[in-house]
Image: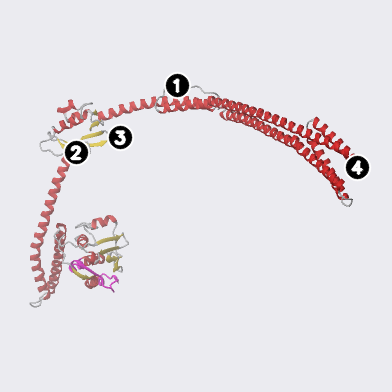
Amino acid sequence: MTSGKYSIGTKIFGAFIAMSVIIAILGAAAYGVLSSAGTMAATTFDGPLMAVHYAGAAQSDFISLQMAQLRFENAPAGERPAIAAEINNLSATFNDDLAVAEQRSLAPEERRLIRQINALVGAWRDARNHGDARQLERLDTQVDDKFDLLIELNTDNSFIMRRQTLGAIDNYKYDTVGAIGLALLLAGGITLFLRRRIISPLAAAASVADRIARGELQTPIPHGGDDETGALLKSMMVMQVNIRQMMTRETELRRSAENRLADALETSREGVILVSPDGKIVLANSTLRDFFPQIAPALVTGASFRDAIALIQTQLAPGAEGAPDVSGHAELELADGHWIRMTASATSEGGSIIFLSDFTMIKDREESLRRASREAEAANAAKTRFLANMSHELRTPLNAIIGFSEIIHGQLFGEIGNSRYLDYSGDVLRSGRHLLEVINSVLDLSKSEAGKMVLDLKPVNMREVLKDCITMVREQLAEAELSFVVAGLEQDLCLAGDPAKLRQIFLNLLSNAIKFTERGGTVSVGAGIGPAGVSVTIGDTGIGMSPEDLDIALQPFGQVDNRLERRYEGTGLGLPLTRALVELHGATMVIDSARGQGTRVTITFPKADDLEFAVAI
């Protein structure tokens, strides 16, 4: 920390005080010059010039007295009093003007002449009172001569005073020029002092800072004084030492990092090539040479990367696709059966870094997965064909079983002797119909998965479809002792769809709702038209499902309760088939369910104008 005695602020303040003193001296000198000039002008004007003026005025007054005296002598008796009064006034004016001329006169000779003129004029008044004409004439001549001499003296003294004034002004001019020159010399000295003590050290500090910023850390730093500039230079010395130490540490750390990086790359299981912006290999690890042992001697530091790529291409399997590139990645099949994946990235310096890894095992797994996928697709196709064939083969005998059971149960050819046979025929009829429904569901689901299910699209009023479904399940609702709530069927719900498939969707959902709802519960049907289209919601207060249960229920043949003694019977095809039919109509199905809180299934069909159904899916 610099002391106040030697600080830059103190130096600048001292220079300000010195300049202020110089300016004050120049101002005082200028004020003295102006004051002296004013005094000279006033003295010149108030002295000789005024004396000449009033002396001339007094002479004019005396001439007027002489003229008035002549008029008095020649005037009639009646006019003489007025002329006498005029003479008295002129005498008073003469005395006043002559007194002022005496006051303004600076030379003793002028004042002596004025006193002589006063004495002669007094004698002139006495001669006038006595009427001595000869005396008056003689005195007139003397007074005129004295006045001429007085005016001449006044004029000479005025010229002398003017010369003195001009000489004094010239002296003041030289003094002013000298004072200004001296002030300029003092200001220049102060400026040189400030430059030497402030500007030059600051310029040296700035030059040193620029050289250090350019990396010239060995630049010598001059020693400063005891002011802020000296403190700055000392701080720069400390900063220079710290920068040197930091650069030394950075260099050591960089070398250590480079060594660790080189060790890591050398021990990496991946091949690494670092390419400079000019296309030369900067680094190539041993793993890379292990990948290509036949061309290993060419994959060294300093070799051309373009030549290395050309050599690598000679190692590829015949007919292998994909040429090595530094702009992205490539998968290379080598002649020995191995697969190499090459990935390239650009570096910040304009070069590239290329990683090569052996992914033969991954390729083998991919091939295994492809074979498994093909086998699975073949098995699925075989399953579809099997289900279609089996469904057809099962339908023929089932239709016969159902037909004969209906004849027996209806006793079309007469009564059956034993009523138990009638009961058995009813059981056979129900079982046959159930089995036919299962076969139809399996066949429909198989068609859906195979993309062969066809929709018979036509304009449909969903209100009528829902009413038909409600009619079909009312008996089941009554047997299950469930409450039934219907809402939103007061309006037409028009859309384009397959009426049979739509009935199948909602009969499946209503059957599930009835099946999984305890006695005393409630099943609901709600419908409406919204911005997205026609929405239908089937709800119940049944057992509900957790998210895990829902995932199982949506899978074909999935059973949430898969115990041998499970409570609810079913094949697990209803919900998957329902979802397939919903998607076939271009609709969406949302299931909101939780264990013990029931289930709500909402299906939203798009507006008829927006439908774009595929004929077969």
> Could you tell me if the residues under marks 3 and 4 are in contact, i.e. CB atoms within 8 Å?
no
Q: Is residue 192 left or right of residue 406?
A: right
Q: Which residue is mark 4?
A: 129
* Residue depth check, mark 3 versus mark 4: number of the one nearer the observer: 4
* Residue depth check, mark 1 versus mark 2: number of the one nearer the observer: 1
Examine the image and state in which quarter residue 165 appears: top right
Q: Is residue 421 left or right of residue 555?
A: left
Q: Is residue 347 magenta?
A: no
* Residue depth check, mark 2 versus mark 4: number of the one nearer the observer: 4
Instruction: Work out whether mark 1 precedes mark 2 in sequence or the reverse, and give the earlier one.
Output: 1
Which region shows up in magenta? 477-504
Residue 525 in sight from this viewpoint: no
Which image quarter is the C terminus in? bottom left
Q: Whole-Å distance between the Cαs marked 1 and 2?
A: 56 Å
Question: Crowding near pointer 4: few (<14 within 10 Å), some, many (20+)?
Answer: few
Q: Nearer the viewer, residue 163 or 322?
A: 163
Instruction: Work out whether mark 3 precedes mark 4 in sequence or the reverse, and give the earlier one.
Output: 4
Q: Is residue 480 magenta?
A: yes
Question: Crowding near pointer 3: few (<14 within 10 Å), some, many (20+)?
Answer: few
Examine the image and state in which quarter residue 2 appears: top right
The circle on residue 220 is 1
Instruction: Work out whether mark 2 precedes mark 4 in sequence or the reverse, and give the earlier one.
Output: 4
Q: Residue 315 at what x, y percent from top left?
A: 13, 32
Q: Whole-Å distance between the Cαs marked 2 and 4?
A: 151 Å
Q: Which residue is mark 2?
A: 330
Q: Which residue is mark 3?
A: 348
The kind of residue on which mark 4 rests is Asn
Q: Whole-Å distance between the Cαs marked 3 and 1?
A: 35 Å
* Residue depth check, mark 3 versus mark 1: number of the one nearer the observer: 1
Q: Nearer the viewer, residue 207 or 51?
A: 51
Residue 342 lies, with reference to residue 167, above or below; the image says below
The kind of residue on which mark 2 rests is Ala
